[in-house]
Amino acid sequence: MPRNAPSLAASTLVGRRRFLSVALAGASTLTLAACGSTFPGGGGGGGFAEPTPSSTSAASGDVIGTGSVRIALVLPKSAGGQSAQIAGQLRNAAELALKDFPGADVQITVKDDAGTTEGGQRAASEAISEGAQLIIGPLNAVSARGVAGPARSAGVPVVTFTTDTTVASRGVYLIGFLPAVDVERIVSYAASQNRKSMAAVVPDDAYGMVVEAAFREQAARSGVRVIAVERYKGDPADIQAKAAAVAKLGASIDSVFVPDTGANAAQVIQAMVSAGLDRSRVKFLGSGRWGDSASLASPALAGGWFPAVDPQGADGFKSRYQASFGQAPGPLAILGYEAVFLAAGLVRNAGPKPFREDVLLSRNGFLGVTGLFRFKADGTSERGLAVMEVSGGVAKAISPAPKQFAPGT
């Protein structure tokens, strides 16, 4: 959510200082982890093999930076439509990351996967032949499956933006915002506030299936009773019917999980209230999809809770992106910044072979623009999220994002 600042220049200066300190902090925790543990020589045991020697050709196409360590950024530049638009924003964010990281010793080659498996395979093979030590991207699971083959054979790790966990594996790491992480944070927080009898109203689609499964699992871990789960399609009549079914539960529930976009969630919540659900007693819970400013203005979401990345870091990124490119970034652009900034930090601080497995799987994780995150051995990721409350058309933090993972986790 935007904050007032004395001036854009002052805001930008403060933001850059903060991001540099964040990178150094993340690298410091990583270094401490390495000093306190014994790791297998370079590869970290299992997963991708050590990179195999190969001839290195000159980088071709769109190149960002002039450093000695080559990284590939694989994006659907020619896919058209929304994919191409997001690709452009991710590319801009990568450029901004290097701008904000003084003296970054990396060179990024931007490769086009056309949004296809074959395109991903071709882009990865070309990047590896040019000496890429890390592949960032692709955007979607289809292309990621193509990238994974050549990358695995060459021992080059992949940090991809897709949230499809079927793509994740040791060596293919998901940096995107995984729905299960959202669910874990909001359900566990609500349980800590004595919200222990929940219903859920989820969209009847692939995303809804994922969040429903995560909801049931996290509810069990948090000691929460799941009273009912309703799945709805997009038509108003179906929404009304499912909302009425939840409203009939009355005093048997103290909270309702509505993990859809803010606009859709507002429609569902309004339907439940119109059907007689007492919003003064029931707390509405959302997912990270609630976080757009237009939706937050809806009175239906007022008082609701939802998980979000560190607001301070996200706001700083948005301001600098707007200043640099003359337009607001989309919600995924920040991941391009995060991935490139992390790579530059590891090159500077993680020693030889900065993208080896024991480094990327640091238990302490990394503290970046979106807050705390770490990769897991299965390729998925964890994040330290804040919990926000909708109030007066904006979101305010009621539980801050953690700065470190709990010991032993």
Image: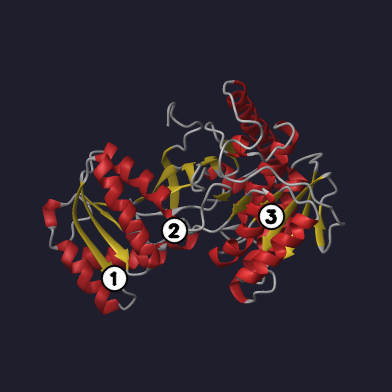
Look at label 3 and name its amino acid.
Answer: Ala
Sequence order check, earlier mark of 2 and 3: 3
Look at label 2 and name its amino acid.
Answer: Arg
Q: Which residue is mark 2?
A: 289
Q: CA distance from mark 2 to mark 3?
A: 21 Å
Circle number at residue 267: none
Sequence order check, earlier mark of 1 and 2: 1
Q: CA distance from mark 1 to mark 2?
A: 17 Å
Quarter location, residue 234: bottom left
Q: CA distance from mark 3 to mark 1?
A: 36 Å
Q: Is residue 390 visible?
A: no
Q: Which residue is mark 3?
A: 93
Residue 71 placement, left or right of 333:
right
Q: Quick check: marks 1 and 2 in contact, CB under 8 Å?
A: no
Residue visible at 66% across and 34% down in the picture: 42
Residue visible at 70% across and 36% down in the picture: 20
Q: Position of residue 330 (x, y in %)?
A: 59, 61
Q: Position of residue 218 (x, y in %)?
A: 30, 46
Local SS, label 2: helix
Packing grade of label 2 (10 A; few <14, some 14-19, many >=20) is many
Q: Which residue is mark 1?
A: 232
**Looking at the picture, does residue 247 appear above or below residue 9?**
below
